Amino acid sequence: MDSEPKCRFNFPMDTCSKTRLDFEEIHTKGNEPQYKARIVTRRNDSQLNNNQQLQLQGWRAKCDIQVVIDHYACVKYLTKYASKGEPRTPMLKAAFNRIMNNAPSNDNPHKAIKKLL
């Protein structure tokens, strides 16, 4: 049995002493082999995601980086990002409800949002 639980984002990740590129063969309709590149950045903590040190120092928060070197990686990233389901925060829900309850039905939506903000 593992001492650390696994999550859907593959944490904890293995530590890595040196940044490297891993290539994974992907299945395609044709018989020609194609590969997907994945960057594995140096990390000394199993809870740290792929990062770029300069970006972390400037942003001062966790930032996940990915290498996009082909159309497959780009489409996969955009599809995953666009379809990511995020729960609404209570503050966002309250703001939306205020807009809907206080705006006249014939009011311009942009105008109603500007009034609230």
Image: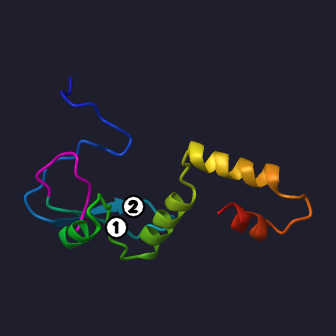
* 24 magenta-colored: no
Q: Magenta segment, which residues?
A: 43-52
Mark 2 nearby-residue class (10 Å; few <14, some 14–19, many ≥20):
few
Q: Does the image show residue 89? A: yes
Label 1 belongs to which residue?
35
107 or 67: nearer the viewer: 107
Find out whether the residues at labels 2 and 1 contact each other: C-beta distance under 8 Å: yes
Residue 13 locus on image (x, y percent): 22, 46
Quarter occupied by residue 57: bottom left
User: Residue 20: x percent and y percent?
Assistant: 17, 66
Amino acid tagged 2: Ile
Which residue is pictured at 29% across the width and 67% down the height?
A: 59
Q: Is residue 46 above or below residue 109?
A: above
Position of residue 73 measured from the top left corner of the image (x, y, whole percent): 42, 68
Question: Which quarter of the rendered picture does the C terminus lie within?
Answer: bottom right
| Residue 70 drawn above or below residue 9 | below
Three-letter amino acid code at disc 1? Tyr
Corner quadrant of residue 34: bottom left
Which residue is labeled 2 in the image? 26
Compared across the picture, whether 100 is left or right of 62 comes to: right
Res 43 → quadrant: bottom left
Vertical comparison of 114 with 3: above or below: below
Outermost right residue: 106
Circle 1 Cα neighbour tier, 10 Å, few/some/many (<14 / 14–19 / ≥20): some
